[in-house]
Amino acid sequence: MANNTTTYRVQRALTEPEMTAITAEIDAARDTGGILAAVVRTVFGALLATIGESLASYGPGHKLDPRQFAVPATQWTAISEACTNRASAFGARVTIALELVNVMPSSYDDPSAVIPSRPTVDHRPYEHVLTVSREATDVIAACTRHCDALARHFGEHSREHRDAASSWQPNLALLFSMDFGAATSVRRDGDLSLLVSCGSGFTYGIIFHPIPRRCARAHCTAVISDDGTARTCRRDDLACEDGAHVPAYPLDAPAPGSWSFHS
Ligand SMILES: [Zn+2]
C-alpha cells in the first residue's frame, strides 16, 4: 500500500461479512445483467459507506468511476471468479469476463486480505445438448481424415501434420465446451469448416485455412491450383517465364493448413 503511487477515493480490504454478502448476491443473480448489478450494489455499496456516501447519490448525471476504488487483488479475483462461476449457469462465462472489466474496482497487493471459504458450486445446467446436422458430422469426420492424410503424406512429425492436428483438436474440444451455453447447434460451412450457434446467442466458425500452393522457384509469385493452373495475383506480378512452375507441395497431396476460431 505504502509504495502505491495511485490515490484512490477508497482503498481497503473488504471484511469477511462483506465478502460473504457479495458472493451470496452474485450466486442469487438470475442473468448476466443481474450479476453485474449485484457487483455494483454490494462492492460499491460497501466501499462508498466508508466515506459516508451511498449509490443513491450516483446516476446517469453523476457517474461512479469504479477505477477510483481499490480492493486487494486476492479479493478482486475471488469476486471475479464468483461472477464467472455464476455466469456458467447462463453460458455467459466469456461475456461476463469482458463486462466485469468495466464495473470492477481497481486492485492492489495485500496478501493479508480475508477470503471466506465457501463450497464450490457447479452452476452449469446438468446437460449440454449438442445438435449436429448430418452434413456437419461428415465435415467432422473429413477434418479428422484430413489430419490423417497429412500425416501419411508429409509424415507424422511434419510441420504440415502438426499445424493441422494441433489446431483441429482444441477446436473440436471447444464444440463440447459449455462456456457459451448448454444448447449448441453445429452446421456445415464448407468441406472442412463448421458454423456453431450457441445457447447464449453467440455464434462462431471453425474455419480451415489451406496454405496456398505457391511456386517454389525463386522470384515467382504464382499460386498453383489443384488442377495445375498457375495464377499470379496481378497480371504483371513476377512469374517463371518458362511456365515451368514447381508446386510447393504436390497437386495430389492433401492441402496443408490449419483451423482457426472466428467469432
Ligand atoms: Zn513459378
Image (cartoon, helix red, strand yellow):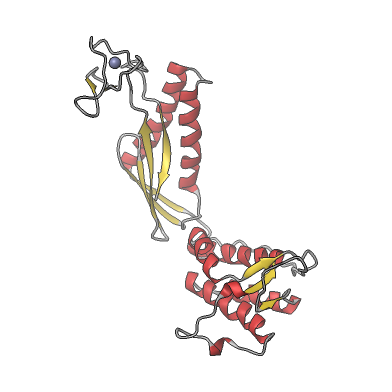
Residue 70, given in percent of the width and then of the height, sits at 66, 72
Residue 222 appears at what percent x and percent y? 28, 21
Q: Is residue 175 above or below residue 211?
A: below
Towards the viewer: 71 or 34: 71
Frontmost residue, 116 versus 49: 49
Name the residue nearer the viewer: 136 or 10: 10
Count of residue discs: 0
Can you give x and y, in whole percent of width and height, for residue 240 in the image?
26, 14
The answer to whether 200 appears left or right of 170 in the picture is left
Residue 17 visible at all = yes
Task: Say whether residue 28 is visible.
Answer: no
Residue at the far right: name it. Answer: 112
Quarter of the rendered image showing ligand 1: top left
* Among the 4 quarters of the image, the one containing residue 212: top left
Left or right of 187: which side holds 79? right
Q: Position of residue 214 (x, y in %)?
A: 33, 22
- Where is residue 231, by image quadrant? top left
Would residue 263 appear left or right of 53 to someone viewing this image? left
Image height check: is 201 above or below 236? Answer: below
The residue shown at (22%, 29%) is: 234
Outermost residue toward the front in this view: 5
Residue sitting at 33 percent across and 23 percent down?
A: 213
Q: Nearer the viewer, residue 34 or 214?
A: 214
Quarter the N terminus occupies: bottom right
Is 75 drawn above or below residue 16 in the view shown? above
Which residue is depicted at the point 42% across and 44% down?
A: 261
